[in-house]
Image (tube, grey):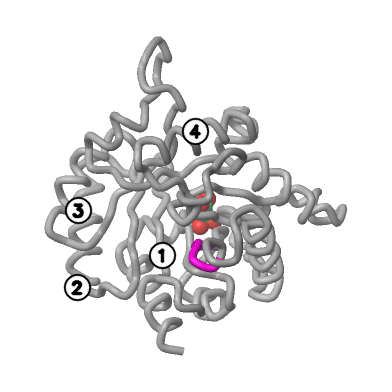
Amino acid sequence: MSKRTPLIAGNWKMNKTATEGVELVQAIAAAVGIESAVQIVLCPPFTALSAVSAAVEGTHLAVGAQNMHDKVNGAFTGEVSAVMLRNLHVTHVILGHSERRSIFGEDDAFINRKVLAALEASLKPILCVGELLAEREAGTTKDVVRRQLELGLQGVPANKADQVIIAYEPVWAIGTGKTATPAMAQEVHAFIRQLLTAQFGAESAGRMRILYGGSMKPDNADALLAEHDIDGGLIGGAALDAKGFVALVQSAAKSLAA
Ligand code: PGA
């Protein structure tokens, strides 16, 4: 692990009511105490954001949303904007998750507009990229990642680059129990850092966090987080239970000491 502050983000997806979310936050906060070497971001569904934001007050846990629209307001039934999220003390937002891309048809141009809108509102985007199984088997992983990254980050000013967090999530590893091996993940992470260097310069790229996502669990986290360019995790299933999630935070803290 490098000198970058590791980040463990929980993507709760469409799970947890506001009440259940607060219970989970309280259990996580009690277990991690004042562990501040690792940045922790919890991303509940929209309906739990307000309650979770209130529950993290006084802890060092931060709150993220799972999506947003790129416009500030207007006739977009069912959507929420960056300004609305900021108003709830949300600091991060997951954008371009593969479920948004595949189930809800979001394309790179739309995701790019959201990234720019998030930065404009001082929200830190967690931009997700990753290949499908067929793309990996066809040997096009790097082409896919390059396209999603370059189009997703188009127009991001260099002085805001280190506000952006990238999550590499091979789609075939999400929720399947299959994980990329640490070497497979590191290869793509190093490639992503090369692309970031080309766009933003070595200094900014060296500061940017690149998270791994896709069935990261307590039993495989140590090996993944030990890789040089893996700066944390975007956690789905294992983020729904305090014990498992806290174990991942501890793995990230351990990787710093290594
Ligand atoms: P998973 O999900 O940890 O359940 O594989 C990760 C994600 O979709 O962000």
Numbered disc 4: secondary structure: helix
Magenta span: 206-210
Please provide percent x and percent y for residue 37: 31, 75
Q: CA distance from mark 3 to mark 1?
A: 22 Å
Left or right of 118 in this view: 21: left
Q: Mark 3 or mark 4, which is nearer the start of the sequence?
A: 3
Please provide percent x and percent y for residue 29: 20, 64
Left or right of 173 in this view: 25: left
Q: Nearer the viewer, residue 198 or 58?
A: 198
Q: Which residue is mark 3?
A: 23
Q: Mark 3 or mark 2, which is nearer the start of the sequence?
A: 3
The disc at residue 34 is 2
Left or right of 32 in this view: 183: right
Q: Residue at x 44, y 33 (%)?
A: 117
Numbered disc 3: secondary structure: helix
The residue sitting at the bottom extreme is: 258
Name above or below for residue 242 compared with residue 92. below
Numbered disc in front, either 3 or 1: 1
Numbered disc 2: secondary structure: loop
Instruction: Identify the amino acid type marked 2.
Output: Ile
Q: Residue at x 21, y 38 (%)?
A: 50
Instruction: Identify the amino acid type marked 4.
Output: Lys
Left or right of 70 in this view: 188: right
Q: Which residue is mark 1?
A: 7
Q: Which residue is mark 4?
A: 114
Instruction: Identify the amino acid type marked 3.
Output: Glu
Name above or below for residue 208 compared with residue 109. below
Q: Mark 1 or mark 3, which is nearer the start of the sequence?
A: 1
